[in-house]
């Protein structure tokens, strides 16, 4: 009985400790989200932004954006961009992680250098890549021309497809060290004993990788992929600085389109609706992630 | 319980990222004023040496004085320092009002106005790009100052400029400075190629042909997907008899076709669809373009980037059977809703008065929008500014219309579609016209 009372008291104390965090989240995260949902159901334009009475529109803003060609393109672009980035940065990040796990001379300083791209402000990265991809005097065209891989300079950021590729490459450059670091931590957690035992049993390198490394790394891989997805899906600064969503709308993604609708064209309701679609996509991914994690834990 | 906890966690994960997405864009706003503050304090001691009495007031900040904030987007390293000097002069000239000038990049400033309408956190007064003035007035960002203006005996502005401050028959601001576009040319390159300064489109094309080399384009323009792109396209559109309201007319299409040909022939870099006007200036300064279309606000930038560059300015070439045309650019200043109207009005009428307006406009590469300042006379004998001064009176304004941002979006999109080869001129212009028709029918 006494112990039980003690437990409850401790429990109360626990809640007390998380109160500041919860209040903070409600005010600074909960409120904007709720507000955004409300706005997305209202008629909010330049004329009604300041007024207290805005017409309730139901799903009209959502209907409008789904009828909008640019929005559908932006949705598709966002997925293409995210999947493209994930494939490149995860596979190369994994390779780097395995490579640096070998612990050769200078492996640590070199790994440190690679991480620099992750620490640079995204705006700087975007500007540097914008210069490098320039058609006339960009270094990438200069190298490709010099090696005779191409005979005409490519307008990297001037054509829809290559512009998207350019964005994916720039973002992967940032994302590779992020993937590498997380995977390295995971690799370090795998006991060397297991590998030794496998060697004694005569396992090949490939067998060790497929049977030991990957299964034991699965939780890390899952979180790397989900975190990578979330971080990539919500891209804004990189696209905004490198292409501004252009040329025309070839690299428009959900975040830049939402920004454009709200702050350049003053269709706040539709801008909010686009932001909410972005939110729903990420929310679903997060749910799937938690589901897989909890299933693994039960096993 | 466990399931709801999972949902909550998922919510928190995604929520954080969504907020972060907005938050990261906000940081410059939060940082800028913070950077501004120390700069202010550094300036204060300078004032001390000249006038000890006002210096005391400076040191104690704005104590005992009515403090107002003024937002502007004149970048700190260029025109901004002249704005700060003017504000300091105002602060020292009287002991009633203390103005805090805050610099924010243009796009950020515009966003903060929009947010301010909802949050109520607006400055006392601030700057706005003139084609956007109507939109922000319709949003309720600015105070109606019609009565104050009518009782101001120094109210004397050029018609096109003051018109951009009117929305729905009421006045929401005062013109701050005007600018327009001209053709900058590299004298050395033109001389070497034996080219005269082009005055018509045919001459321009011929000049480009001679000036374009492997490492240097004939002309640099900005055709970026925002207001700057539309601004730069306007002189061409107007010169061939085109109009914003009739993009499918022969004249409108002719101008777009002409520019597209310059790009196709390699005289203008296709890269221009990603270039701001500042980027075009960099190309010209670096000798990678023999000519550029730009405005007088680039003089200070050129002096920094290429102090030895010998360049001249001419009017934007006219269509072979058309007239010279230019577009009116510039900024207005306005008092924000719920601000200290009286103090702001005192400050704004001081800084837009005849004497101050002509002084500050000259130093920031603008032309005074006041009708009682004769800019032609003022810049007589100045080979660069006089060209712009001559063009200024006939420069056409954009709008004024609260729908201008959408009209502008239709135009710069069409330009980008044509320049990147996604649509031919006819289709792109017809599509843009359809968008503009839809806007006006709303």
Image (spheres, rainbow, N blue to C red):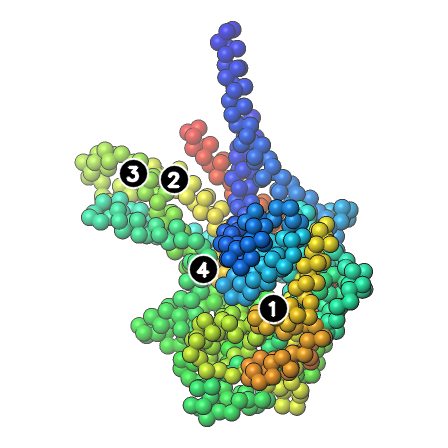
Chain where mark 1 sits:
B
Query: Residue A220, labelled with which disc?
Result: 2
Contact, CB < 8 Å: mark 2 with mark 4? no
Callout 2 crowding tier (Cα within 10 Å): few <14, some 14–19, many ≥20: some
In the rendered image of this protein, does residue B114 appear above or below residue A4?
A: below
Please give the name of the residue rendered at 48% of the width and 74% of the height, measured from the top-left corner: B302
Q: Dividing the image into 4 quarters, which one contains the C terminus of chain A?
A: top left
Chain where mark 4 sits:
A
Q: Nearer the viewer's eye, disc 2 or disc 1?
A: 1
C-alpha gap between disc 3 and disc 4: 33 Å
Query: Residue B360, labelled with which disc?
Result: 1
Residues A167 and B54: in front is: B54
Q: Secondary structure at mark 2?
A: helix
Judging by the rendered image, the residue that carries numbered circle 4 is: A126
C-alpha gap between disc 1 and disc 3: 64 Å
Residues B397 and B312: in front is: B312
Q: Is residue B153 left or right of residue A159?
A: right
* Quadrant in which residue A12 is drawn: top right
Q: Nearer the viewer's eye, disc 3 or disc 4?
A: 4
C-alpha gap between disc 2 and disc 1: 60 Å
Contact, CB < 8 Å: mark 2 with mark 3? no
Asked if residue B95 can be seen in this view, the reply is: yes
* Quadrant in which residue B113 is drawn: bottom right
Q: Secondary structure at mark 4?
A: helix
Q: Nearer the viewer's eye, disc 2 or disc 4?
A: 4
C-alpha gap between disc 1 and disc 4: 35 Å
């Amino acid at each position: 009985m006494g112990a039980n009372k003690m437990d409850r008291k401790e429990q109360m104390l626990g809640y007390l400790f998380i109160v500041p965090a919860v209040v903070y989240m409600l005010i600074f995260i909960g409120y904007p989200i709720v507000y955004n949902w409300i706005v997305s159901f209202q008629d909010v334009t330049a004329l009604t932004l300041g007024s207290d009475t805005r017409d309730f529109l139901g799903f009209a803003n959502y209907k409008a954006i789904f009828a909008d060609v640019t929005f559908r393109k932006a949705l598709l672009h966002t997925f293409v961009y995210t999947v493209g980035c994930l494939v490149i940065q995860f596979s190369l990040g994994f390779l780097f992680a395995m490579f640096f796990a070998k612990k050769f001379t200078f492996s640590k300083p070199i790994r440190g250098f690679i991480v620099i791209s992750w620490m640079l402000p995204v705006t700087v990265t975007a500007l540097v890549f914008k210069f490098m991809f320039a058609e006339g005097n960009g270094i990438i065209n200069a190298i490709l021309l010099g090696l005779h891989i191409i005979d005409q300079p490519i307008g990297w950021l001037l054509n829809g497809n290559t512009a998207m590729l350019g964005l994916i490459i720039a973002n992967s450059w940032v994302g590779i060290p992020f993937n590498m670091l997380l995977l390295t931590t995971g690799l370090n957690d795998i006991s060397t004993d297991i590998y030794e035992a496998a060697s004694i049993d005569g396992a090949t390198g490939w067998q060790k990788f497929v049977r030991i490394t990957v299964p034991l790394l699965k939780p890390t891989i899952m979180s790397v992929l989900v975190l990578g997805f979330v971080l990539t899906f919500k891209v804004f600064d990189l696209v905004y600085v490198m292409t501004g969503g252009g040329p025309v709308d070839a690299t428009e993604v959900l975040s830049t389109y939402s920004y454009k609708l709200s702050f350049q064209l003053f269709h706040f309701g539709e801008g909010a609706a686009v932001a909410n679609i972005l939110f729903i996509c990420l929310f679903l991914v997060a749910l799937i992630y938690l589901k897989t994690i909890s299933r693994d834990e039960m096993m | 319980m466990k399931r709801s906890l999972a949902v909550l966690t998922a919510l928190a994960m995604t929520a954080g990222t969504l907020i972060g997405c907005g938050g990261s864009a906000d940081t410059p706003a939060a940082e800028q004023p913070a950077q501004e503050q120390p700069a202010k304090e550094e300036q204060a001691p300078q004032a001390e040496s000249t006038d000890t009495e006002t210096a005391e007031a400076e040191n104690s900040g704005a104590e005992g004085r009515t403090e107002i904030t003024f937002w502007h987007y004149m970048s700190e390293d260029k025109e901004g320092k002249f704005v700060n000097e003017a504000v300091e002069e105002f602060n020292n000239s009287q002991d009633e009002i203390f103005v805090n000038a805050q610099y924010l990049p243009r796009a950020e400033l515009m966003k903060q106005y929009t947010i301010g309408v909802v949050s109520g956190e607006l400055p006392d007064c601030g700057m706005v790009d003139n084609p956007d003035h109507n939109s922000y007035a319709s949003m309720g960002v600015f105070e109606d100052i019609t009565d104050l203006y009518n009782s101001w005996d120094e109210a004397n502005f050029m018609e096109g400029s003051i018109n951009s401050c009117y929305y729905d028959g009421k006045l929401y601001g005062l013109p701050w400075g005007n600018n327009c576009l001209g053709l900058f040319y590299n004298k050395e390159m033109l001389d070497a190629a034996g080219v005269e300064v082009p005055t018509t489109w045919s001459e321009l094309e011929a000049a480009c042909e001679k000036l374009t080399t492997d490492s240097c384009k004939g002309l640099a323009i900005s055709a970026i997907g925002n207001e700057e792109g539309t601004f730069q396209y306007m002189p061409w559109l107007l010169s061939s008899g085109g109009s914003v309201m009739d993009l499918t007319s022969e004249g409108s299409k002719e101008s777009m076709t002409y520019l597209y040909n310059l790009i196709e022939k390699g005289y203008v870099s296709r890269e221009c669809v990603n270039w701001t006007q500042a980027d075009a200036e960099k190309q010209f300064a670096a000798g990678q373009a023999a000519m550029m279309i730009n405005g007088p606000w680039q003089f200070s930038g050129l002096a920094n980037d290429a102090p030895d560059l010998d360049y001249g300015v001419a009017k934007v070439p006219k269509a072979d059977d058309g007239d010279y045309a230019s577009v009116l650019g510039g900024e207005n200043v306005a008092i924000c809703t719920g601000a200290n109207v009286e103090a702001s009005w005192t400050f704004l009428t001081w800084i837009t008065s005849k004497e101050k307006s002509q002084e500050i406009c000259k130093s920031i590469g603008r032309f005074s929008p006041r009708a009682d300042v004769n800019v032609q006379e003022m810049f007589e004998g100045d080979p660069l500014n006089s060209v712009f001064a001559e063009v200024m009176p006939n420069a056409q304004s954009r709008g004024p219309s609260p729908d201008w941002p959408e009209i502008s979006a239709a135009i710069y999109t069409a330009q980008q579609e044509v320049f990147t080869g996604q649509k031919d001129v006819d289709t792109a212009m017809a599509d843009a016209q359809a968008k503009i028709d839809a806007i006006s029918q709303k």
